[in-house]
Image (spheres, rainbow, N blue to C red):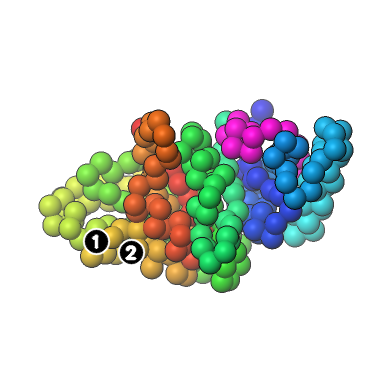
Amino acid sequence: MARTVTVGVDETRESMVAADWAAGEALTRGRPLRLVHVWSPATDAVTPVPDRGSGRRGAERLLHAVAGHVHRRHPEVAVETAPFSGSPVDRLCDASEDAELLVLGSRRLGTVTGFVAGSVSQAVLVRVRRPVVLVRTEGRPARWAGDPAGDVVLGLGLDRPRDDVAAFAFDCAVRYGCGLRLVTDVAELEEREHVLDDVLAAWRRTYPAVPVAREYGPGRPGRTLAEASRGARLVVLGLRRRRLRWRAHLGPALHALLHDAAAPVAVIPHR
């Protein structure tokens, strides 16, 4: 079975924007788009579902509506739908196993904007093994590969630069036909500039068509990446998966970025 670009959808505007972005991404990758909706009768306090059958019918109606919206905007993309019942986090993680990447929308809760806000997104991030792209709605609509402007921004730590994270970012830049901006902490650069030169030389040999620019931030990498995200097409950052018993751990840089980013954020999990 071909891998898909999978997106979690619900009744919110955020998930519709995420579905649009995911459809554009599926088009550039030559992959089908899979729309996933998880309904949970036991926890639905707003619109209680009287029985399993009606819950599934509601899920199918929602998926049909989103699929119609996607088809009108992206008629070239093959769309499939998948309703699930149960825990949203569990089912989204399960659905991601067969996906090339998982796409989720952002949420706004009260005065807090950003991706974390509670939540399903945070819980999925610390468990999923596939790349996750988080798409927000504040400001301008999320860009996709058909847009004429915007580079891919790659946040890179020089203590242990990850080839899989960089490869994801460079692959996106190739497909989008844009440049890549490499963002590094100045404090790290002073001690490890030779590391950056070595890894850049290797990546430039592999991706000779991608123009690369360096940007240096004065500490607080999450804030630096958030600033770099203004006008960017995508921000890419690695996430080292840590097994903590009592709480999810995203790390300060990613946590800050998810609250303030002005572009979709791709999180690449690794050990």
Image quarter in which the N terminus is found: top right
Image quarter in which the C terminus is found: top left
Mark 2 and mark 1: Cα distance apart in space: 8 Å
Farthest top residue in view: 1
What is the magenta range? Answer: 78-95
Relative to 157, say whether 96 is above or below.
above
Residue that numbered label 2 is attached to: 224
Farthest left residue in view: 191
Dot 2, how many residues are within 10 Å of its Cα: few (below 14), some (14-19), or many (20+)? many
Residue 22 position within the rendered picture, expressed as x and y whole percent measured from the top left? 63, 51
Front-most of residues 119 and 177? 119
Q: Amino acid at mark 1?
A: Gly
Position of 237 with respect to 129 (left or right) is left
Which quarter of the picture shows residue 235?
A: bottom left
Which residue corresponds to the image point at 43% horizontal and 40% vertical from the top-left?
248
Position of 52 with respect to 259 (left or right) is right
Residue that numbered label 1 is attached to: 219
Tag 2 near tag 1, CB within 8 Å: yes
Which residue corresponds to the image point at 69% horizontal and 32% vertical from the top-left?
86
82 magenta-colored: yes
Q: Amino acid at mark 2?
A: Thr
Position of 62 with respect to 199 (left or right) is right
In terms of sequence position, does the residue under pointer 2 or pointer 1 come before the other? 1
Q: Is residue 259 visible?
A: yes
Residue 67 position within the rendered picture, expressed as x and y whole percent measured from the top left? 78, 49
Q: Which type of secondary structure does the marked residue at label 1 adopt? A: loop
Q: Is residue 177 visible?
A: no
Residue 32 position within the rendered picture, expressed as x and y whole percent measured from the top left? 68, 42
Dot 1, how many residues are within 10 Å of its Cα: few (below 14), some (14-19), or many (20+)? few
